[in-house]
Image (spheres, grey):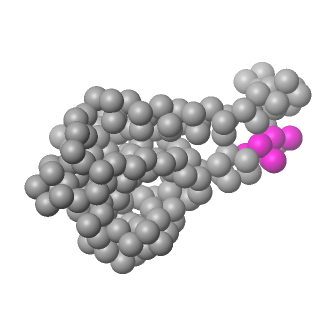
Amino acid sequence: MKILVPIDGSAASVDAVKKALEIARKYDFQIKLISVVDIDKILSYRRNASMWRSVDGSILDTRTLLEMEEIPKKLMAEANSLLDEITDELDFFGVDLEKEVLTGEPYEVILETAKKENFDLIVMGNRGFSKIKRFFVGSVTQKVIAEATCPVLVVHSDVKE
């Protein structure tokens, strides 16, 4: 059996990994950790950059716009690092583990992955965040609960972020 665990770096998502590990050990489940970067929204902001202005009101220069093109690469690298940090910090010994960074609208990617790869359970945090808020609109967890084709276990975190 397989558990899907979306990770965004929040305390709630780390708690979800810990709960998934507990379940996987007890019932011999596989775990897949994913982190989703919404590159489409980032690139749409880039396409509209002519409307962007610096703090002093001037239009952003070409160098700044080119640096903005590096943002998706940096976010993908950051997401990979996040998954590596979590797998390094927690003991996954004896648990079949896979990890992957995906792109797209987070809740859609989570649902698509769960369905396409026949996951038996999604374990996720009750709230999330990232350093740039990952451009979330609405609650990813609520959307996943509403539309998932498999059970969703929501892990609550006591940590205030």
Residue nearest the observer in this picture, 35 or 69: 35
Residue 56 visible to an observer of this rendering: yes
What's the residue at 73%, 24% (across, down)? 55
Question: Residue 5, can we see it?
Answer: no
Q: Which residues are magenta?
A: 45-50
Does residue 135 appear to the left or right of 154 in the view shown?
right
Secondary structure mostly seen in magenta is helix
Residue 57 shown in magenta: no
Q: Name the residue rendered at 33%, 36% in the picture.
A: 87
The N terminus - image quarter: bottom left
- Depth order, front residue of 7/117: 117
Residue ID at (51%, 62%): 109
In this rendering, the answer to whether 56 lies above or below 38 is above
Residue 6 at x, y percent in the picture: 39, 52
Of the pair 139 and 90, the residue shown nearer to us = 90
Point out the residue furthest to the right here: 62
Q: Is residue 47 magenta?
A: yes
Would you say 26 lies left or right of 109 here? left
- Outermost front residue: 94
Q: Is residue 117 left or right of residue 121?
A: right
Q: Residue at x 42, y 43 (%)?
A: 8
Residue 77 location in percent, x, y?
Answer: 57, 33
Q: Is residue 160 above or below residue 42?
A: above
The residue closer to the viewer here, 155 or 83, is 83
